[in-house]
């Protein structure tokens, strides 16, 4: 089969790119190992995604936002960053912006399901499921992709959207920095006695990070980042012990807390490709940049990048320029690198600072919170990242 574009990976970023390109006279093939049943009804993975205003705007334009159950979308109106056991916090409020919220929190599975629904019945978008790419080759005239079934498909260009440990990126020979933090992220849903007032908390405790993210009603998403050698102990805790542990570490701010359902764990990596394109080949989503979750930039960056790529391709089509040409993909690379590099390295520096046990690091952390609260330009810059819509 011949296509114009093959997208490897059916995560929400790859699916959103397919939807964004579907208005063009292009045929698109998405290749993924998952079944169509799992694409349309993804399993709960415990992850809640913080959505910025720009991401909401993009998802609305693509038709995904209206497909997400409104009762499953929670509002983030305030955010507080705490250091150790100190009650002092770096505080962000929607009241300091022109928006009614800082952002939204949505289950990852609902974003994936909505993204799939937008392309499910499109005539020019085809999903090849329950298969994976075995190998591919690229030459001056196009790309040749061999699937594990032995089937061969062709396209003018390949888009790799297969995650931060992207096999496609490696096969293409694109180097990347992969940072193994030696930590594990544990996520779960908890019910609590007191209202959270739509406030998100990021608590940098010594040896671990605890995030409490507001969900609809008296529920929250709990995100623990801890050294991998200690993660098994937490996963094996009884619900009673786990409830008491989280409640205590959060200083009883939400009263009694009760875990709801399963706890999920994920190894923590961050990655950044040296460049995002090669001949007839381009990286999007986590295959381009995989962020540490502490600043909640991951999905938002990936969605923004795929949206920008789609717009660059649309402009190329209007100008009768091949969408797979070096200049077109180079433009995407330059624009996305300018956005991602400062955020990627800045986040990693922040994470290292707040996980350090050195006395000087502890002092800097305390000073940083007060500086952030009292130096308006810095605070405004952070809030603009959350509330920008363009």
Image: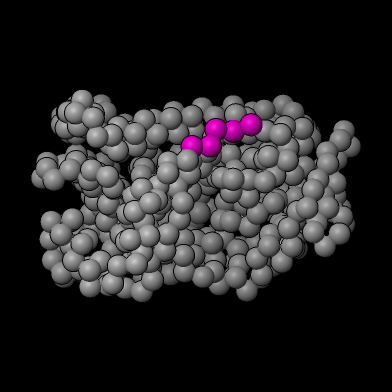
Q: Nearer the viewer, residue 171 or 29?
A: 171
The mark tally for this picture is 0
Q: Which residues are magenta?
A: 175-179
The residue lying at 26 percent from left, 41 percent from top is 97
Q: Is residue 321 left or right of residue 178?
A: right
Q: Nearer the viewer, residue 323 or 275?
A: 275
Per the picture, the main secondary structure of the magenta-coloured stretch is strand
Is 292 drawn above or below residue 66 in the view shown?
above
Q: Position of residue 360 (x, y in %)?
A: 20, 25
The residue lying at 23 percent from left, 43 percent from top is 206
* Magenta-span inclusion, residue 302: no
The residue lying at 17 percent from left, 43 percent from top is 84
Q: Is residue 386 left or right of residue 269?
A: left
Display coloring:
one colour
The residue lying at 34 percent from left, 53 percent from top is 230
Q: Is residue 188 left or right of residue 77?
A: right
Work out whether residue 82 can be spotted: yes
**In the displayed image of the protein, which residue is found farthest to the left?**
87
Q: Nearer the viewer, residue 384 or 44?
A: 44
Q: Position of residue 181 (x, y in %)?
A: 42, 41
Q: Is residue 312 left or right of residue 338?
A: right
Work out whether residue 54 can be spotted: no
Q: Position of residue 307 (x, y in %)?
A: 57, 44
| Quadrant placement of the C terminus | top left
| Quadrant placement of the N terminus | bottom right
Q: Nearer the viewer, residue 134 or 310?
A: 134
| Residue 191 location, quadrant | bottom left
Q: Position of residue 27 (x, y in %)?
A: 78, 53
């Amino acid at each position: 089969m011949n296509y114009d574009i093959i997208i490897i990976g059916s995560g929400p970023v790859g699916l959103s790119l397919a939807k964004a390109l579907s208005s063009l006279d292009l045929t698109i093939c998405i290749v993924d190992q998952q079944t169509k049943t799992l694409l349309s009804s993804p399993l709960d993975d415990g992850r809640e995604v913080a959505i910025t205003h720009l991401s909401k705007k993009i998802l609305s334009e693509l038709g995904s936002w209206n497909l997400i159950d409104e009762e499953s979308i929670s509002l983030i109106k305030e955010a507080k960053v705490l250091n150790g056991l100190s009650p002092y916090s770096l505080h962000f409020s929607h009241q300091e912006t022109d928006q009614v919220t800082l952002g939204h929190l949505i289950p990852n599975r609902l974003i994936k399901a909505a993204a799939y629904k937008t392309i499910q019945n499109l005539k020019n978008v085809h999903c090849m499921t329950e298969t994976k790419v075995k190998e591919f080759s690229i030459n001056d005239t196009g790309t040749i992709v061999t699937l594990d079934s032995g089937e061969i498909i062709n396209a003018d260009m390949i888009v790799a959207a297969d995650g931060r440990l992207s096999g496609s990126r490696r096969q293409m020979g694109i180097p990347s920095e992969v940072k193994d933090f030696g930590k594990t992220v544990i996520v779960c849903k908890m019910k609590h006695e007191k209202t959270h007032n739509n406030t998100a908390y990021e608590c940098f405790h010594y040896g671990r990070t605890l995030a409490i993210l507001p969900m609809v009603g008296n529920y929250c998403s709990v995100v623990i980042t801890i050294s991998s050698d200690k993660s098994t102990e937490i996963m094996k805790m009884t619900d009673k012990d786990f409830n008491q542990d989280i409640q205590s570490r959060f200083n009883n701010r939400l009263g009694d807390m009760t875990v709801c359902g399963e706890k999920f764990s994920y190894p923590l990596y961050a990655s950044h490709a040296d460049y995002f394109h090669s001949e007839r080949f381009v990286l999007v989503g986590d295959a381009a940049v995989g962020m540490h979750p502490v600043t909640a930039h991951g999905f938002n960056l990936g969605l923004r990048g795929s949206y920008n790529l789609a717009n660059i391709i649309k402009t190329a089509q209007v100008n009768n320029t091949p969408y797979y040409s070096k200049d077109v993909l180079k433009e995407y690379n330059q624009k996305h690198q300018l956005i991602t590099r400062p955020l990627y390295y800045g986040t990693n520096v922040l994470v290292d600072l707040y996980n350090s046990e050195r006395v000087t690091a502890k002092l800097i952390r305390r000073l940083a919170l007060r500086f952030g609260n009292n130096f308006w330009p810095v605070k405004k810059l952070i809030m603009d990242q959350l509330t920008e819509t363009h």
